[in-house]
Image: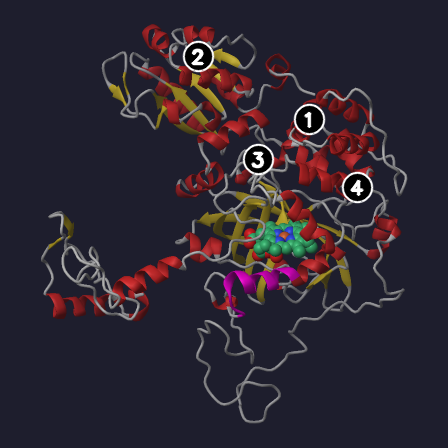
Amino acid sequence: MAKKTMSASEIRGKKKESHGGGEARQAAGGELHQTARGQHPILTTNQGVALSDNQNSLKANPRGPALLEDFILREKITHFDHERIPERIVHARATGVHGFFQLSSSLKKYTTARILTEVGEKTPVFTRISTVAGGAGSVDTPRDVRGFAVKFYTKEGNWDLVGNDIPVFFIQDAIKFPDLIHAVKMEPDRGFPQSATAHDTFWDFISLTPESMHMVMWIMSDRTLPRSLRMIEGFGIHSFRLINDSGKSTFVKFHWRPKLGLQSTIWDETVKISGADQDFHRRDMFDAIASGNFPEWEFAVQLFTQKEADQFPFDHLDATKLIPEELVPLKVIGRMVLDRWPNNFFAETEQVAYCPSHVVPGIDFSNDPLLQGRLFSYQDTQLSRLGSPNFHQIPINAPKCPFSNQQRDGHMQMEQPEGRVSYEPNSLSENSPRESPAEGFHSTALTETGEKGRVRPESFADHYSQARQFYLSQTEYEQAHIASALVVELSKVDHLHVREAMVGHLRHIAEDLAKRVAAGLGLDKMPSAPRTAAPVQKTKPSPALQIIGKMKDTLKGRAIGILIADGSDGALVKKIKKAATEAGAAVKIVAPKVGGAKLADGSMMSADGQLAGTPSVLFDAVALVLSDEGAKVLSLESAAVDFVRDAFGHLKAIAADKGAQALLKTANIGHDAGVVSANDETAFIAAAKTRQWSREKSVRTLA
Ligand code: HDE
């Protein structure tokens, strides 16, 4: 490419020589296609040859056949034909952002890793948050787990913490991963659904995999419907080890906690967001970064010894289990701020290659059999996705500390090592890299005993206790959402025996849940529960597992929409906008025309969104400021009626002035604590900070 082969000044120099510059070129249609105004470099081929014409291919005569000798056309088309690389098998759809990690509390007692011991140091990171099941072009908002992968470019090499926004996983052993993913992905004969768990093959597999029941509770909760990627938690899931300078190891679980608090949407809202804005999450992140509202997460650890682990009522090496915060509290040790959007989506977000096997000295793996499988899988998948063992040389993947070894050659080798020596030990070179017992990576010294075999340990046999704990820890609203989500999902399963099998499993989690789902599915007989491999234990509820309990009483990071039309009261709009902005919200004016509306005082107010393309699902609360006449016109506009009805149905605060009452009436909106006067902005801001949960029973039937 031009910028690789020539500097800008070289290109400009070349331009003078070959073209003299300044003249406008005219294409066959007589249209001016390009002018040489400004400092544009000359367009060249990948070999640096300047192009005289980028509008027309070479033809035998003006209306004649194209010529094979047109190397310019062939190079351009060939490159284009190869633009796509294989997308990730899972986690293809994602948003990636640069930022930094900063340590606030040293773990020196536990580890030698400098990133976890050097307080105040800022380490660059690249974080990629993804959906799992859909392809790269799928919507941002299916019901799905979110991947939460962070690459720390530490002084001692890259550390990749490749986690999810849910602290447990579906399966215990890596050998089941291809089956799980084949079951969730689009069905092979029909090629759908794209990015959804609501289909037969997924639930068939799940119903035959009791170990997945804990994860099922999480994915059926609103955790899989995040309001924003800035409002999700992140988890490393597996236990890892930290190793200190005397070689002692301590187990660790990693957690990310969003500064904005945890927040989700609700199902009907998500369904509509998917239609209104397929890029809802990516756009939200882009806008937040562009406006300087940098998302931030606390980084926390749970530390525990082998002796403590031996007392847990579960096996921490089983990735279907979490360690309740009440058992091992979280210790906040730092923060991550995302503050820079990538320059190029493909070069960075697409080409970034995370591998859980990328750790630094002082961090080590546990024997979790899922993690052990992942240590192989990711390196392997990068070879087929990026096509070369040199993928670490791509700028987004390259460590920011020096790295050097005797590996060589391979596809797309970008380095040009000098000298004769590419092996170790050697006596010919004075400066070739050598191992360093003092600074190098050491694995934990462990004694492994026992019989070799394809076995699951007894300690992995309890599949229901933590699923039950999760369900019982939720508020009544969240429990209703879990039950209703199961009804929606299983309603899309054609095979009755699969629906029944799932309800059978739910009986071990909570009989009440099983009954609600059975009723929602219209099952006339309660299916029998399967045999359990271990008794279901009594567990204490853990409020930390809720979403509602973790939502913050703030408008920071949220969005308010103000609907106006001709005749609206401009002073009132400004007053609401000021109060919402001061409370931290992003405010958008929505009007029937994007050019804006003519206000009561005759002035124009421009709009940020046109009504039909800016439904209320894009906001956390709405205000309606309308004249009598404006409300009358909008009452005949289904987009306006839906704007109000959806805001109400999605449990959002609505502020309405006197004129807007007519629109509320048309939308059949009753009055409750969340429907306030637009003149009382204090009441509106307070109501906008939360969802009106008590309204829910009046707007939908939940299971
Ligand atoms: Fe992954 N996973 N995974 N996974 N995973 C991939 O690697 C795999 C698992 C996760 O933003 C792939 O580069 C196996 C658990 C994230 O680029 C692949 C197993 C967790 C991402 C792969 C698991 C994850 C991936 C596809 C079972 C949460 C996206 C492309 C042993 C802790 C990273 C790629 C990004 C991506 C394999 C299970 C999280 C195929 C074999 C558990 C966030 O290598």
Q: Which of marks 1 and 3 is nearer the N terminus?
A: 3
Q: Mark 3 points at which residue?
A: 226
Q: Marks 3 and 2: CB-CB under 8 Å?
A: no
Calculate the distance from the C-alpha at mark 3 to the C-alpha at mark 2.
28 Å
Q: Which of marks 3 and 2 is in front?
A: 3
Amino acid type for the residue under numbered disc 1: Val
Residue bounds of the magenta highlight: 377-389
Calculate the distance from the C-alpha at mark 1 to the C-alpha at mark 4.
19 Å
Residue extending farthest bottom: 428
- Determine whether the beta carbon of the residue marked 1 sits less than 8 angstroms from the nearest atom of ligand 1: no
Q: Name the residue under label 2.
A: 656
Q: Name the residue under label 4.
A: 210
Amino acid type for the residue under numbered disc 4: Pro
Residue 112 locus on image (x, y percent)? 67, 65
Q: Is residue 114 above or below residue 341?
A: below
**Label of residue 577 in the image:** none
Tell me which corner region of the image, top left, top right, bottom left or bottom right, holds residue 21: bottom left
Q: Is residue 202 above or below residue 422?
A: above
Q: Between 632 and 211, which is closer to the camera in this rendering? A: 211
Q: Which of marks 4 and 3 is nearer the N terminus?
A: 4
Image quadrant in which the N terminus is located: bottom left
Q: Earlier in the sequence, mark 1 or mark 2?
A: 1
493 falls in the magenta region: no
Determine crowd level at label 4: few under 14, some 14-19, many 20+ residues with C-alpha closer than 10 A. Answer: many
Determine crowd level at label 3: few under 14, some 14-19, many 20+ residues with C-alpha closer than 10 A. Answer: many
Q: Is residue 183 above or below residue 598?
A: below
Q: Between 82 and 325, which is closer to the camera in this rendering? A: 82
